[in-house]
Image: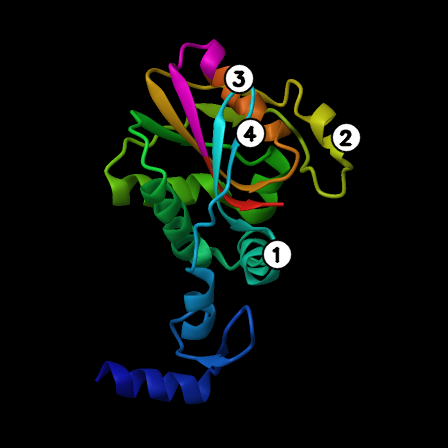
Amino acid sequence: MRKSLELLLGTIFPNSCVLCGRAIAPFSVICDECEHELLQGPIPLVEKTKWCEVHFYGRYDSKLRKAILAYKNEGHWRLRRILAKMLIATMERYKIPCDRLTWVPSSFRALEERGYDTMGTIAKIVGRSIHLECASLIESTASSTKRGLTRQQRKESVRGAFRLKGKPEGVIALIDDVYTTGATMNECARLLLEAGAQKIVAYCIARA
């Protein structure tokens, strides 16, 4: 019955993969080929900063870049589950015991534009999947996004751009989508550590 319904819907309302344009089932968002290509990570890449250790799923290029942008800027919110799978795979590869999971929050302008906190939505899926308490510990005080800024401007823009919402304790897993200069991730890690967190372990979907 379901296959017949999908065939009928596919005829009336044709659907295509948001990444490559191939015809797909009515209730899908990307094709099997693109999903298989996306789920080949994580790559062996770890960076240590002053405030945290950062683990990455992949490089910010090709279809991974397109998937992140489609999720964030084109309203394809259903990609959240695929992006969550990438973070889960990264956390399983670099398995470090953590007490809580939190995320880098969206700016107020981004929340207005998209209608949801992109990483907050993903964090809840990740937390449920790996049975880790998920808590909103940081909020953004920035009124705009960092799109179009230079590396130096990005670094300067994060100063005072976040504040704590809750009390961090123990080892905190901190997640974000794209790591460019590292300024945002490090600012959030700094806030958490200075407020009492024992250690910050960071995970990013992509390294720019």
Q: Amino acid at mark 2?
A: Gln
**Residue that badge 2 annotates:** 153
Q: Nearer the viewer, mark 3 or mark 1?
A: 1
Q: Nearer the viewer, mark 1 or mark 2?
A: 1
Q: Which mark is residue 190?
A: 3
**Residue that badge 4 annotates:** 185
For the residues labelled 1 and 4, the Cα–Cα distance comes to 20 Å
Q: Is residue 127 left or right of residue 42?
A: left
For the residues labelled 4 and 2, the Cα–Cα distance comes to 15 Å
Q: Which mark is residue 61?
A: 1
Front residue of 127/42: it is 42
SS category of the residue bearing label 4: helix
- Which callout, 3 or 1, points at the residue further toward the start of the chain? 1
Residue 74, quarter of picture = bottom right
In which quadrant of the rendered image does the N terminus lie?
bottom left
- Which callout, 4 or 3, points at the residue further toward the start of the chain? 4
Front residue of 71/67: it is 67
- Which callout, 1 or 4, points at the residue further toward the start of the chain? 1
Q: Residue at x 38, y 72 (%)?
A: 27
Q: Are marks 4 and 3 in contact (CB under 8 Å)?
A: no
Q: Amino acid at mark 4?
A: Met
Q: Residue at x 56, y 19 (%)?
A: 50
Q: Amino acid at mark 1?
A: Asp
